[in-house]
């Protein structure tokens, strides 16, 4: 008898395979009635997500490749956790390609196994160009993009520009007018990371909407990381008219700004407000005000989208899912001092 698949469970329960995956991962996004139906179907079919059994019965490799940059960064770790949980529940093995340089990225895409050795591909943040997308389609590897975009491939992203606007609008609502931005280098972005441009654009848009001038000396850009952010924040705080608030490209860079303030004996938030972006796990420990993007959920939703693609016999337009961000106000932002 052929092994039972996640698709069989979905059919028995009258739901999609993404819903079955959520039940297997104890996701709170499933109603209790649906959860009971799926669990009943799992019990009735005696389903177990065994990749070995599915390889033998389904003619698939049961392997999904993930190409990810800098996967030691906390934001990528949390996305990868979402991906791994969904794939393991579906009985798939994960093959991880770490990319630190453009040359390594190109090598991974060129050396990608053909469809008979790989069932699907997830690409994080590293948007492929038209020629690379055409090659993926030619070799028959279903592909989903996470945190990047191509109009012909399924994508899962967040609205980085809207999140950045919300961060700056929060500072403006508190009464800040001298608002600095500490971000990644705009003109040195070899991977073409969309958030670098989108978050800067959101910063500028929020200032313009509030009729606040853009002050070039309040815009600092450099390499990603808390040390570089600390250096840039030191420069900002040494200005004759230093900013009363800093919006950082990421939580990691916000931590650098917080350390610079501490070293300059500037109290946060009384003398300086700091807001980040991402809401990685450690942000709560630092009581950092930040913009939460659903990191785990983007990874999980991308993996679910790929499983839906693999288990669908119908060709349909590539879906583009945009997940919302959320302002999380903690203890690093407050109204500016009366005489900053």
Image (cartoon, rainbow, N blue to C red):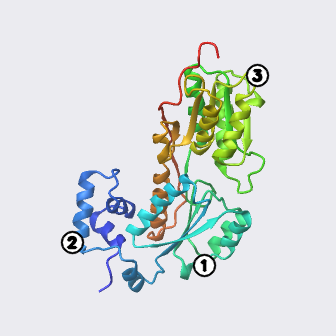
Residue 45 appears at what percent x and percent y?
Answer: 25, 74
- Calculate the distance from the C-alpha at mark 2 to the C-alpha at mark 3: 72 Å
Q: Position of residue 51 (x, y in %)?
A: 40, 78
Q: CA distance from mark 3 to mark 1?
A: 57 Å
Choose the circle earlier in sequence order: 2 or 1: 2
State the image coordinates of residue 83 (x, y, percent, origin top left): 47, 62
From this viewpoint, is residue 59 visible? Answer: yes
Element type at mark 2: helix
Snapshot quadrant of residue 23: bottom left
Q: What residue is disc 3 on?
A: 240
CB-based contact (under 8 Å), mark 2 and mark 1: no
SS type, badge 1: loop
**Residue labelled with disc 1:** 113
Q: Nearer the viewer, mark 3 or mark 1?
A: 3
Q: Nearer the viewer, mark 2 or mark 1?
A: 1
SS at mark 3 in the image: loop
Between discs 3 and 1, the one toward the N terminus: 1
> Looking at this view, is 88 or 47 the one in front?
88
Residue visible at 61% across and 54% down?
A: 148
Earlier sequence position, callout 2 versus callout 3: 2
Q: Which mark is residue 44?
A: 2
State the count of labels: 3
């Amino acid at each position: 008898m052929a092994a039972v698949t996640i698709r069989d469970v979905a059919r028995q329960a009258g739901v999609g395979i993404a819903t079955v995956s959520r039940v297997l991962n104890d996701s709170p996004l499933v109603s209790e009635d649906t959860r009971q139906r799926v669990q009943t179907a799992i019990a009735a079919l005696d389903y177990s997500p065994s990749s070995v059994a599915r390889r033998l019965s389904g003619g698939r490799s049961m392997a999904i490749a993930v190409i990810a940059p800098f996967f030691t960064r906390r934001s990528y770790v949390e996305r990868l956790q979402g991906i791994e949980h969904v794939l393991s529940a579906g009985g798939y093995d994960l093959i991880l390609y770490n990319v630190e340089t453009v040359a390594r990225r190109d090598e991974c895409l060129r050396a990608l196994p053909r469809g008979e050795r790989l069932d699907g591909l997830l690409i994080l943040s590293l948007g492929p160009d038209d020629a690379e997308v055409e090659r993926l389609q030619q070799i028959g590897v279903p592909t989903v993009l996470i945190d990047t975009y191509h109009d012909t491939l399924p994508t899962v992203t967040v609205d980085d520009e809207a999140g950045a606007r919300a961060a700056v609008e929060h500072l403006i609502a508190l009464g800040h007018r001298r608002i600095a931005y500490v971000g990644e280098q705009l003109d040195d972005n070899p991977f073409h990371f969309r958030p670098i441009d989108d978050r800067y654009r959101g910063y500028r848009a929020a200032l313009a909407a509030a009729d606040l001038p853009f002050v070039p000396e309040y815009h600092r850009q450099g390499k990603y990381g808390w040390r570089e952010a600390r250096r840039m924040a030191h420069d900002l705080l040494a200005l004759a008219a230093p900013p009363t608030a800093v919006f950082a490209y990421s939580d990691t860079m916000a931590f650098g700004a917080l350390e610079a303030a501490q070293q300059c004996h500037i109290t946060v938030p009384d003398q300086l407000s700091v807001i980040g972006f991402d809401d990685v796990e450690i942000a709560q420990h630092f009581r950092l005000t930040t913009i939460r993007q659903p990191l785990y959920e983007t990874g999980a939703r991308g993996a679910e989208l790929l499983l839906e693609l693999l288990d669908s016999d119908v060709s349909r337009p590539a879906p583009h899912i945009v997940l919302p961000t959320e302002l999380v106000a903690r203890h690093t932002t407050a109204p500016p001092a009366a005489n900053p």
